[in-house]
Image: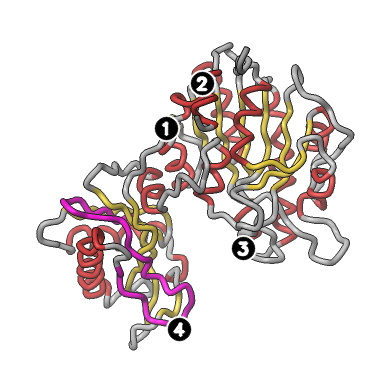
Amino acid sequence: MNQQDLIAQLREDNGTKIVMLVADGLGGLPIEPGGPTELEEARTPNLDRLAKEGTVGLSIPVAPGIAPGSGPGHLGLFGFDPIEHQIGRGVLEALGIGVEVGPKDVAIRGNFCTIDAEGRVTDRRAGRIPSEVGERLVAKLAEGVKIDGVETLVAPVREYRLVVRFRGEGLGDRVADTDPLQTGLHPLAPKATDPGSEKTARVAAEFLRQAKEILKDEQPANFLMMRGFAKFPAISTMEEVYGLRSAAIAVYPMYRGLARLVGMTVVEPGKTIADQFAVAREQWGKYDFFFIHYKYTDSTGEDGNFAKKVEVIEALDAELPKLMELKPDVLIVTGDHSTPSRMKSHSFHPVPLLIWAPATVRPDEVTSFGERPCIRGGLGQILAKHIMPLAMAHAGRLQKFGA
């Protein structure tokens, strides 16, 4: 029996409400030795109050020393072992924009890029073309690419990102990415990493050959690269495991896709965190669990902008009273991983974690929310996959185990 089987056996419905607020890439590092992290530098009176009233600790997204992608980072938060459930990004992007992924399908994330006359990549994101340009280019590909024996679908995601779906018999998903991950190199050829994916690699190569011809006169997006070849995985839903009617309020497609993957209802989020909290209010009576995703703590960290990351943390904190007016029984505040602006990337560092549950919490001595205070918190350091069982317990939704 694994953790999810145990939770499914012990769960009970008592009408309580759980909110998981994920500030993507929340964790950070000091710019100078001994200085504050972004979260510690930020003025966060509301988060500090919740830390004082609740309990804090640090979440390890996958395992010590492992820097996770957003997919495994979120699966851990939802209580799924991210090592056991490895989900390709193509499926997440496809589900995020409402593209169906069936048993005969392979979904792939595409990035428009710029190549020079010798075919070397000069910009891996094609100058971050606006979404309307990406949509026009996707329409050209959808009309122009024809591959015998395979149905192809091409759909825009956002800016330079797109989804490609192949549908047909005998398609595996063990194909390596074609992105060389740096400029000055040629895009890689699609290469199968097992015999069952040879057909997919051939189809992808033909798709790219035709796409190169279709896009040759475009600038800056005159080619594309493929990442995250994936079939739909076998995975339980939030309702099957926890008995929770779950809603996702997320702006960016990938996180909507993650939510759909585990059976959440994705509701229209608006554009700002204030909009997202307003949507939570509107939907409050319909669901037991709310996943609310805030992207900007991650994007500012990846940009290496310490001051801007501080600013977006403060903006989130300023809106928190609107969420707390709903009086959730349990509130979780954490991130799916750390994105220190000092490193400009996801990192292996544990992530600040706060659980506020006035009826059941055992307070610690921490009075503010930040990396250093969280080291001293009552939760200690825990794997992210253990957060949902704690939330269920604090919500009074788990029966006793054993006699």
**Residue furthest toward the front?**
403
Residue at 36% x, 71% y: name it. 221
Kind of residue indicated by mark 4: Gly
Residue at 18% x, 63% y: name it. 145
124 left or right, relative to 301: left
Q: Which mark is residue 345?
A: 3
User: Where does the image place residue 205, in percent across and percent down from the top left?
Assistant: 24, 70
Pointer 4 residue:
184
Mark 1 or mark 3, which is nearer the start of the sequence?
Answer: 1
Q: What element carries label 2?
A: loop
Mark 3 or mark 2, which is nearer the start of the sequence?
Answer: 2
Q: Main secondary structure of the magenta part?
A: loop
**Residue furthest toward the bottom?**
118
| Label 3, label 1: how far apart the Cα atoms are | 30 Å
Dot in front, 4 or 1 = 1
| Label 2, label 1: how far apart the Cα atoms are | 18 Å
User: Where does the image place residue 168, in percent across and percent down from the top left?
Assistant: 17, 51
| Disc 4 to disc 2: CB gap under 8 Å | no
| Label 4, label 3: how far apart the Cα atoms are | 21 Å
Pointer 1 residue:
236
Pointer 2 residue:
287
- Whether residue 387 appears in this view of the structure is yes
Kind of residue indicated by mark 1: Ser
Foreground of the two, 116 or 358: 358
